Amino acid sequence: MKISIVAGGSRGDVQPYVALGGGLQRAGYDVRVLTTDDFEGLVTGAGLQFCSTGKSVEAILQSDEWRKTTERGNFLVILSHMQKEVKKQAEHLAKTLPPLLEGTDLIITGAGGMGGTFSIAQKLNIPVIQAYVFPFSPTREFASPLTPTLPLGQLLNRFSFHATRQMIWQTTRTADVATRKTLNMPKGSFFGHFRRMNREKVPTLYGYSNHVLPRPSDWEAHIDVTGYWYLDT
């Protein structure tokens, strides 16, 4: 089986997925990691195949154009420029990823998948696995880690996860809209992929320890806590 892991962001975002890829390869799978140019050494150093998705976000933000924009100090101008950059990068990935995913039997991606990868997988009809390093699936047993620690109660605990999902989704929705438009796909749901993926029982992996945060009893069978994804180094 050929597995493609799509990861982006900073090293803290990418490294756990490289470690996961190394574990999968040792288990006998053919694994490649699709990420930005600055992580080629990290990927190949772990013995995995590297596929470039282009420049890193950091390289873009350090460009002369972005420096001039931020030095102006106008938040609305910065926000507008950021939206244009997000759309441009999404259109680039919508054209870049499909050829790189040729021959792939399974895609693994995390929060970055909401920026277009889930839609690309849907377009190419390639199965996808969600993989995160913090709890993202609603549960009654505790609140979302991105909400304040409060005595919310079981019902509000579940709601806190829905709120967190929407917060992250709405910040990436521009990229997903641009992706679907580039691929000539119909408009997606305003509320994201969550309902469809839950209905289809899309597998979800969590890269942290069950001994640190026990798996909630109300999570369904397609949700699994695997343990941390660490590189040996």
Image (tube, helix red, strand yellow):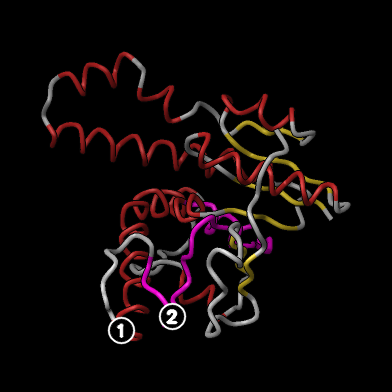
Residue under the point 45% across and 64% down: 186
Q: Is residue 99 visible?
A: no
Q: Earlier in the sequence, mark 2 or mark 1?
A: 2
- Front-most of 97 and 1? 1
The residue tagged 2 is 141
In this picture, is 172 found above or below 186? above
x%, y% of residue 153? 30, 84
The residue tagged 1 is 153
**Drawn side of residue 8 relative to residue 60, left or right:** right
Residue under the point 26% across and 17% down: 67
User: Which residue in the rendered view is the most extreme toward the top?
Assistant: 64
| Secondary structure beneath label 2 | loop
Q: CA distance from mark 2 to mark 1?
A: 9 Å
Q: Mark 2: give few (<14), some (14-19) or many (20+) Cα within 10 Å.
A: some
Q: Which mark is residue 161?
A: none
Q: How many marks?
A: 2
**Residue 126 colored magenta?**
yes
For the C terminus, the quadrant is top right
Give amino acid for label 1. Gly
Residue under the point 36% across and 17% down: 63
In this picture, is 222 found above or below 93? below
> Bounds of the magenta span?
116-144
The answer to whether the residue labelled 2 contacts the one labelled 1, judged by CB atoms less than 8 Å apart, is no
Give amino acid for label 2. Glu
In this picture, is 200 found above or below 147? below
